[in-house]
Amino acid sequence: MTSTATRPRGARARAAIAAKTLRTDRWWFAPLITVVGLSAWIIYATVRVFMHKWYWVGEFHYLTPFYSPCVTDRCVEGSAHVGTYLPGWWIIPDAAFTLPFLLLFRLTCYYYRKAYYRSFWLSPPACAVPDGHQAYGGETRFPLLGQNLHRYFFYAAAIISIINTYDAVYAFHSPKGFGFGLGNLVLIGNVVMLWAYTISCHSCRHIIGGRLKHFSKHPVRYKAWTFVSWLNVRHMQLAWITLGTLALTDFYVMAVAAGWFNDLRFIN
């Protein structure tokens, strides 16, 4: 390396550039959209979680994923499938056993980390744009050390996806017998997207095939690893799609439960 003081004769000095970045495109647009999108979803989800109403349609057994499983003694009749174990205080979410793990799974997700690091923390906001902080410590300090627990939150998210699958299947069995309506399609579509996002996680990909040295000796796991790898490339899109399907599913169940419109029924 050659310092400025010992620069070879005839070599030009580095140009003095006052601007923070020479990028002339709208590099700030993507972080801005991320802030708006995530903020809107967080506000909506927070309001819905603490509304404590319009989450169960007893006529068709529709239960919004924001309240699954319902475990407080405030849960309306029929909505608590695994029992009520917590008091119905306002500050306690009705799905208190699952919501914290879902939040932690998403917070520690590799894509979401990139999204909120770049948008909310400006660390950095875009390529070739300076970091918004004077120093960079990576994920070596609390609370960012908790990001390393992502693989364990994946297991919890997989269990919660199983619970949501049960809710979607259970909704086909209404008090009148087998039934099928638009709400069933909404619930099933949400579950499919949730599974796609969950298993496209980098941790799932590593669990399936990350430690294998010879794929030829494990053809089944290789096939699974190939499929998960295909989904993994789409992890960012699935992360946003599932935010949309979760909000849509919750809003649909809320609207039917509140009587804003009736569920479109195809069978029974």
Image (cartoon, helix red, strand yellow):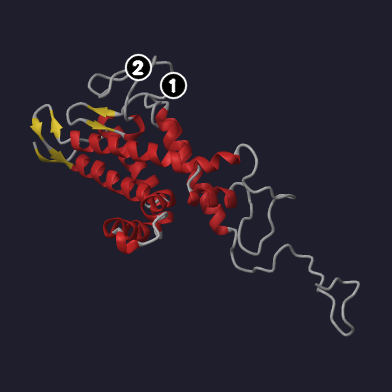
Percent coordinates x, y for residue 144 in the rendering: 60, 41
Q: Nearer the viewer, residue 228 or 169?
A: 228
Disc 2 target residue: 85
Disc 1 target residue: 92
Q: Which of 204 and 266 is in front in this view?
A: 204
Percent coordinates x, y for residue 248 in the rendering: 33, 43
Q: Distance between the residues labelled 2 and 1?
A: 12 Å
Q: In this view, does 41 lie to the left or right of 53?
A: right
Taking the spot 55% from the left edge, 48% from the top edge, the residue there is: 116
**Tags 2 and 1 in contact by the CB under 8 Å rule?**
no
Reply above or below: 170 against 248. above
Name which residue type carries label 2: Tyr
Q: In this view, does 187 lie to the left or right of 4?
A: left
Q: In which quarter of the image is residue 167?
A: top left
In what element is the residue under mark 1?
loop
Percent coordinates x, y for residue 199 in the rendering: 35, 49
Percent coordinates x, y for residue 227 in the rendering: 31, 59
Taking the spot 49% from the left edge, 50% from the top edge, the residue there is: 110
Taking the spot 38% from the left edge, 17% from the top edge, the residue there is: 86
Reply above or below: 180 against 100. below
Mark 2 residue crowding within 10 angstroms, few (<14) / some (14–19) / many (20+): few
Quadrant of the image containing the N terminus? bottom right
In what element is the residue under mark 2?
loop
